[in-house]
Image (spheres, rainbow, N blue to C red):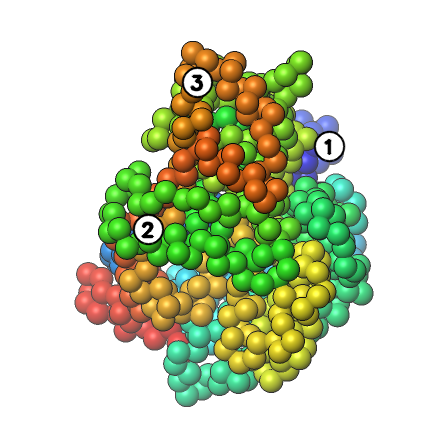
Amino acid sequence: MKKMKYYICAFLMAVLFTACEEVMDNKRDLGSLTPDEVWDSPDLTKRYMDNIISGSGIPDVPYGPVYEKSTYTEEHGTEQRFMHDQHTSNDDSPLGFWNYTTIRNINKFLANVDKVEKLTQADRESFTGQVKVMRAWNYFLSVRAYGGVPLILHEQMVDEDLHVPRSKTSVCINQIIQDLDDAIALGGFPMRWTTEADAGRISKAIAYALKARVLLTYASPQFTKQTPAGTKSKEERWNDAYKAFSEAKAALDAAGFGLFRGGADKSFDDAVQDYYDMFIEEMPNNPEMIWVRRKYRNGPTNNFWSNCSPPSHGGSPFNIPTLELIREFLNADGTSYTGLNALISAAAATGNTAPKVPSATSTVPYWQGREPRFYATIAYNGCVWPLKRNQAYTENEVPDQHQWFFVNATLPYDNSAPATSGSINGIACRKMVDINQDWQNDPSGVDLPVLRYAEIVLGLAECAAKTGKEAEAVALLKQIRQRAGIPPANNYGLGATPPTGDNLILTILKERLIEFAYEGIRFYDLLRWRLYTDELAGFKLNGTMLHTIGAEMNHFNPIEDRGSYQTVLYNFEDINVPGNETTYFSYFDDKVYPKEGTSFNVSDRQYFYCIPYETHIAKNLVIQQTQGWSDARGEGTFNPYE
């Protein structure tokens, strides 16, 4: 079973109460331990470090600070205020990050770790490297949201002025990179943890990969719309990012990281299986995973399935792929899929403004002839997906291997309750769902990727494209497509003349959308390329399906004649075979429903968020508000581009 092997307690006091055996033997009052005694014990020092890491904002991707509905391709919750420019300076946005409690603990640790005389030099360097990376990570999350933030790099004392103003964005970025470089230079900081007990710990590999991600973000249009005097030019930033990705890739390759089962052309079925297995196979043996959020087993709410994948026969999934996401996956030969374009346009043209009001009826077998990653990511009505569940339709005690999502199907664990149009959707996410797990009785999770090797490959491709190395960018893009199972014919779908210039960048961004679906990446790609205002202004989300029973299914009463239609569904024709869609559409009506009644209206100011006034600024009035936002003091004056 997976466990968060090193995520201990939330507070130092809890650490002290689980102290070393020597203290327990002395039967001391653990509450009387002094801070100095923490730095006299390697065990307590390590626990202090683990406590920092456990509370350092490792995102519970994709359910952390990002609401994926804001990406227009994936739905989770509703971040209406962001999409319609309705935030105020008092809103503590889910996109924001302000974790100075952790920063204080990090600085305290770095100020005291050298006092621990009983630590080996290797452990001292390992601990220091891990905590330096976590300080860089915490500041990066804040800078990505706000631009420059108060930069505190020492243990503050009560007799000093605790009111610290915002540092310039460029200064913060330089410090983030300095922390990561310092960590990389530590000889005792492991490049990779090789035991299951330590899998998931902060490593030097994470430092390399995070440095590359930071510099890619800083080079992107979100941060380079303006390049004031004293800051680096766009060209310098892209060159810095290219160098960081090149160094990261070389170091990761040497340490045994790589694309999961990549490097060779493969069959279609093998490609589907490989992409699925990549998210199920645990660290430390998975070469793709650089940094993951490890999940508790048997945690009642800490699992991916209950929030993302569907139960069977009528239960509604929570994280719903939109038709726009369905469209983005490639054809099996690597060319663009266009089968849903007309349907999406027709749905948008109806002018429906409310969810659950159908815009159109689809007869498009969008599930046929798609690339392997589609089948490892998307669940659709009638697909073969043998999840273990209690109330599956059976014949001779053999459960149905299909998943069915349609109105008046019965809920998966309640034979009597029919699902209605208000509680069911017809498309679901199947990515990162272990089919060998009994989800009804074992509601556990999978390791959720924070950084993986494919991001290094595609990040390097993007930087190569922006620094005049387009042939290298195309070669890297082809590595991802080869692993994904796109056949080499037609140059892995890129054609005899691969895209160049802006078209190459757009191709790489689309590849990232597909490759990293449901991994919390897409929102930040749209943000850093300023696509909310440049491309998506006025966009209206038209896109999911509800399946209702059609003419043939109406021969049965879905409740009273359940046994009759169960037999039909159990023995249903393979709908992936061209021609069988005729049978499918005689049994089901696929209704297209809008997801948003109003168009996207993301203003330019939202590329750098306001710092909430009541929550943060009122406690430290030397903090300037971001330009474009106002608070109780008036218009913001802090320039996030400096």
In this view, 94 is above or below 467: above
Work out whether mark 3 precedes mark 2 in sequence or the reverse, and give the earlier one: 2
The residue under label 1 is: 21
In this view, 289 is above or below 558: below
- Mark 3 crowd level (few <14, some 14–19, many ≥20, 10 Å Cα): some
Work out whether mark 3 precedes mark 1 in sequence or the reverse, and give the earlier one: 1
Relative to residue 390, is residue 547 drawn left or right? left
The residue under label 3 is: 556
- Mark 1 crowd level (few <14, some 14–19, many ≥20, 10 Å Cα): few
Q: The C terminus appears in which quarter of the rendering?
A: bottom left
Q: Which mark is residue 347?
A: 2
Disc 2 secondary structure class: helix
Work out whether mark 2 precedes mark 1 in sequence or the reverse, and give the earlier one: 1
Q: Position of residue 581 (x, y in %)?
A: 52, 40
In this view, 376 is above or below 443: below
Instruction: Name the amino acid, label 1.
Output: Glu
Q: CA distance from mark 2 to mark 1?
A: 67 Å
Q: Nearer the viewer, residue 434 or 126?
A: 434
- For image coordinates 28% across by 55% down, the residue present is 349
Disc 3 secondary structure class: loop
Q: The N terminus appears in which quarter of the rendering?
A: top right
- For image coordinates 75% across by 52% down, the residue present is 267
Q: Position of residue 72 (x, y in %)?
A: 40, 54
Q: Position of residue 176 (x, y in %)?
A: 55, 68
User: What residue occupies the far bottom of the structure in this picture?
Assistant: 229
Q: Nearer the viewer, mark 3 or mark 1?
A: 3
- For image coordinates 67% across by 66% down, the residue present is 492
